[in-house]
Amino acid sequence: MPDVLSAPLVVEFPFTRSLGPVQSAFLTGLRERTVLGVRTGDGKVLVPPVEYDPVTAEELSELTEVATTGTVTTWAWNPAPRRDQPLATPFAWVLVKLDGADTALLHVLDASGPEAVHTGMRVRIRWAPQRTGAITDIACFEPYEGEATAESTPHSGEFADPVTGIVTPARLDYTYTPGRAQSAYLNALSEQRTVGERCPSCRKVYVPPRGACPTCGVATAEQVEVGPRGTVTTYCIVNIKAKNLDIEVPYVYAHIALDGADLALHGRIGGIPYDQVRMGLRVEPVWTEGGRHPDHYRPTGEPDADYDAYKELL
């Protein structure tokens, strides 16, 4: 039996967004150790605040300050914190209804163990020493012995140097293990070959293979070697340099229909100025020494393919 392939993969990007007046006031308030909610038309105070009433869709703007103490409404224990989570030691995820609010805020509770946490327990905010205008300005919640209050006072939402935008890093770490069909595809690439699988019903050849025909829904097993040459069906010009990708911009990324395949795969086009890449361009793979997949595709010098030859693959 062949070795099972697996590889660690990371999907990561910074998500940048601008803030409206309500969210701006909320995050700026956290920087100033002030928690703001927004009042709805029926008098409820929502924390965190939203810009539109979730029931009536009415625009909301009446800000109100609530207490930094509250009550746990529900919780879950986290015995093994992950990278970049709020605390490095075991903690509880908690929903906390702050005094003066009618909704609960999700954050973490620093507690000695799950036996120290219960629904209804009183907690208070522990502020981060350095605050920038983000939800992480609340370092965590901690146990508190004080009684609940109905503290809530109107607030203008005005602060010096308000926060107008945030950058939220998004990252997903996982281990990918391909199935039978894609393992065969990857193993063939390491030999500088490209293989797909043919559907026994419609007879189409899919590259990369998926183990089943996406049209007919039947399993595929017959391997078919395709290419190595192919035709550019569509393409885009990339003008923004990606982090950790050592490719100078602008460059072209294209869908390429390999000869003998009924599905276009994607690859970078090199060996030609970016503004000379075109639909119908005939290309071939370029492999680097030790590479397990083509580094890029370059023109073959053949005449361009007729549109009718690849129009079904657009």
Image (cartoon, rainbow, N blue to C red):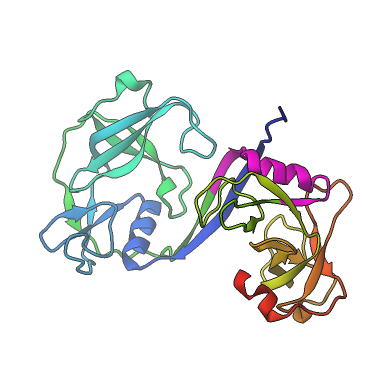
Q: Residue furthest left?
A: 42
Q: Quadrant of the N terminus?
A: top right
Q: Is residue 161 above or below residue 8?
A: below
Q: Nearer the viewer, residue 71 or 209?
A: 209
Q: Is residue 36 above or below residue 305?
A: above
Q: Can you see residue 2?
A: yes
Residue 124 x %, y %:
29, 37
Q: Quadrant of residue 125?
A: top left
Q: Nearer the viewer, residue 205 or 27?
A: 205
Q: Describe residue 14's horizontal placement relative to residue 20 as left or right.
A: right
Q: Can you see residue 249?
A: no
Q: Quadrant of the C terminus?
A: bottom right
Residue 194 x %, y %:
76, 52
Residue 174 x %, y %:
58, 39
* Total marks placed: 0
Q: Residue at 13% of width from left, 64% of height from top?
A: 41
Q: Is residue 116 magenta?
A: no
Q: Residue furthest front?
A: 201
Q: Nearer the viewer, residue 256 or 247?
A: 256
The residue range painted magenta reads 171-195
Residue 307 x %, y %:
68, 80
Q: Residue at 85% of width from left, 76% of height from top?
A: 302
Q: Residue at 23% of width from left, 43% of height from top?
A: 98
